[in-house]
Image: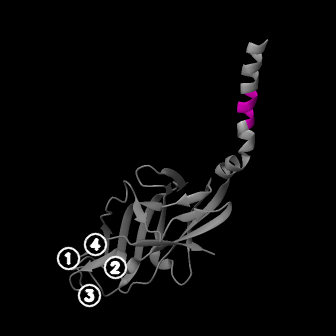
């Protein structure tokens, strides 16, 4: 009889351990809703700067070992110049585990820039002059959005504002009134939005 009571006591002790740690279990299962918005700042001589975004995802931990949480994988096109003076566009919304996240990435499939009337590319492109630009690693790993520090997602709703800085992201080569090309060098910053 004694040989059976020891395993029974051990089994009861193992069952009691998780009950003592319910606070930790609850905190790991809490989630919050993250809304990601896009905005921009003005740029002269540009009529439109359009990007096609096919995926937005958040990374917890380092790039190599962090878990990825998809915010959206619905492809949409955004004219960045329509997103100025407080105007934003919702990129996506998802329920994700509460906690700290170190990176946000946007998978950009295409970027196109159109110049204002009177400004043409050196090759004499017809007015309005527009060019589709090469997106560096945008369609593979995505373009990294810089955080000032880890972003903490709370239970409830967190709003994140991504500023796609057109003035730094589209760099003209040559004479500004007749550029011989445009380099796409994406500069994105993110901050929490009220």
First in residue order: circle 2 vs circle 4: 2
Eye-nearest disc, 1 or 4: 4
Q: Residues within 10 Å of mark 2 (few under 14, many from 20)?
A: some
Q: Would you name the residue on which mark 3 appears?
A: 177
Q: Would you name the residue on which mark 2 appears?
A: 128
First in residue order: circle 1 vs circle 4: 1
Q: Residue at x 42, y 77 (%)?
A: 165
- Where residue 131 sits: x, y (%)? 31, 71
Q: CA distance from mark 3 to mark 1?
A: 12 Å
Q: Is residue 29 left or right of residue 62?
A: right
Eye-nearest disc, 2 or 4: 4
Find the residue positioned furthest to the top. Answer: 1
- Front residue of 99/159: it is 99
First in residue order: circle 4 vs circle 3: 3
Q: CA distance from mark 1 to mark 2?
A: 13 Å
- Where residue 50 sits: x, y (%)? 42, 70
Mark 3 secondary-structure assignment: loop
Does the CB distance between marks 3 and 2 fall below 8 Å?
Answer: no
Q: CA distance from mark 3 to mark 2?
A: 13 Å
Does the CB distance between marks 1 and 2 fall below 8 Å?
Answer: no
Magenta residues span 11-16
Q: Would you name the residue on which mark 4 appears?
A: 183
């Amino acid at each position: 009889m004694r040989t059976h009571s020891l395993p029974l006591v051990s089994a009861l002790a193992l069952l009691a351990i998780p009950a003592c740690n319910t606070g930790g279990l609850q905190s790991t299962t809490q989630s919050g809703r993250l809304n990601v918005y896009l905005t921009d700042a003005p740029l002269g001589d540009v009529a439109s700067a359009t990007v096609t975004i096919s995926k937005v995802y958040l990374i917890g931990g380092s790039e190599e070992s962090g878990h990825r949480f998809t915010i959206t994988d619905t492809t949409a096109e955004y004219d960045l110049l329509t997103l100025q003076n407080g105007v934003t566009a919702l990129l996506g919304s998802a329920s994700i585990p509460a906690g700290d996240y170190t990176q946000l990435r946007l998978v950009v499939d295409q970027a196109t820039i159109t110049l204002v009337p009177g400004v043409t590319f050196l090759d004499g492109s017809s007015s309005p002059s527009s060019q589709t630009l090469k997106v560096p690693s945008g369609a593979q790993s995505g373009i990294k959005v810089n955080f000032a520090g880890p972003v903490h997602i709370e239970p409830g709703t967190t709003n994140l504002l991504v500023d796609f800085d057109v003035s730094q992201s589209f760099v003209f080569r040559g004479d500004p009134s007749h550029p011989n090309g445009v380099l796409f060098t994406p500069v994105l910053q993110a901050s929490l939005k009220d």
